[in-house]
Amino acid sequence: MNSEEVSFFAAYKDHLVVVAWLLVVVGWFLNNSQSNLREKRKETRSEIDAICKKASELADSCREYYTKPVDPQNDVSESSKIAFEVYRIVSRVERLNGRVKRCDGSPFEKSVKCCGVFFEAITSDPFKSSTREKLAPDSDFILNIEESTHGLMDSLEDGFSLAFK
């Protein structure tokens, strides 16, 4: 080392210690924010997977409900279970929409709209109706429920892609 280098370090040794501490603190903040983002991404992914699983199971329950012969006593219990699950799915999607926000809005706004279509497809007439009739497995009504379920699931996947691109 020449004398210029030694005099530079001697003159700025107190500042270099501060710079080192600043680098440590900035590194800690960056690491913490990346860890928080990764955890939020994992939690969101698991919530979407759980919602999609419940929606798929609910579509199966609806297919079973609408394709079996009408039984007034059993229908009340079964339709209540279906309605409860629909409300749970809708509330989970709304909660997800509120949890994942960006400066340009929530990436799950489309999912909330698809929830309305999903809700309408399942709970519209003849749901909980005393005049409900047994439907064919390939009826338009059941296909509409399945289509709305797929639409909801696709919108959740799209929202996840938008939120964490």
Image: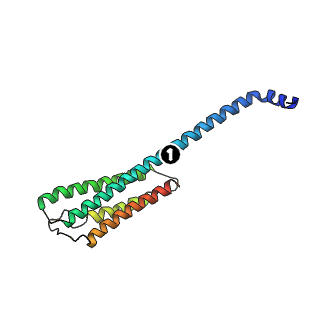
Please determine whether, in this image, residue 119 is positioned above or below residue 102.
Answer: below
Whether residue 139 sits left or right of residue 91 in the image: it is left
- The percent position of residue 22, horizontal first and vertical second, equals 66, 34
Residue sitting at 47 percent across and 46 percent down? 40
Q: Is residue 44 visible?
A: yes
Q: Is residue 106 visible?
A: no
Please determine whether, in this image, residue 25 is positioned above or below residue 105.
Answer: above
Colour scheme in use: rainbow
Whether residue 18 sits left or right of residue 121 in the image: it is right
Residue 131 is drawn in which quadrant? bottom left
Whether residue 117 sits left or right of residue 159 in the image: it is left
- The percent position of residue 111, horizontal first and vertical second, equals 40, 59
Residue sitting at 71 percent across and 29 percent down? 17
Residue sitting at 45 percent across and 58 percent down? 159
Quarter containing the N terminus: top right
Residue sitting at 78 percent across and 30 percent down? 12
Residue 54 is drawn in which quadrant? bottom left
- The total of numbered circles placed on residues is 1
Circle 1 SS class: helix
Neighbour class for label 1 at 10 Å: few (<14), some, many (≥20)? few
Q: Which residue is mark 1?
A: 38
Which residue appears farthest toward the right when viewing the image?
3
- The percent position of residue 13, horizontal first and vertical second, equals 76, 28
Q: At label 1, which amino acid type do we have?
A: Arg
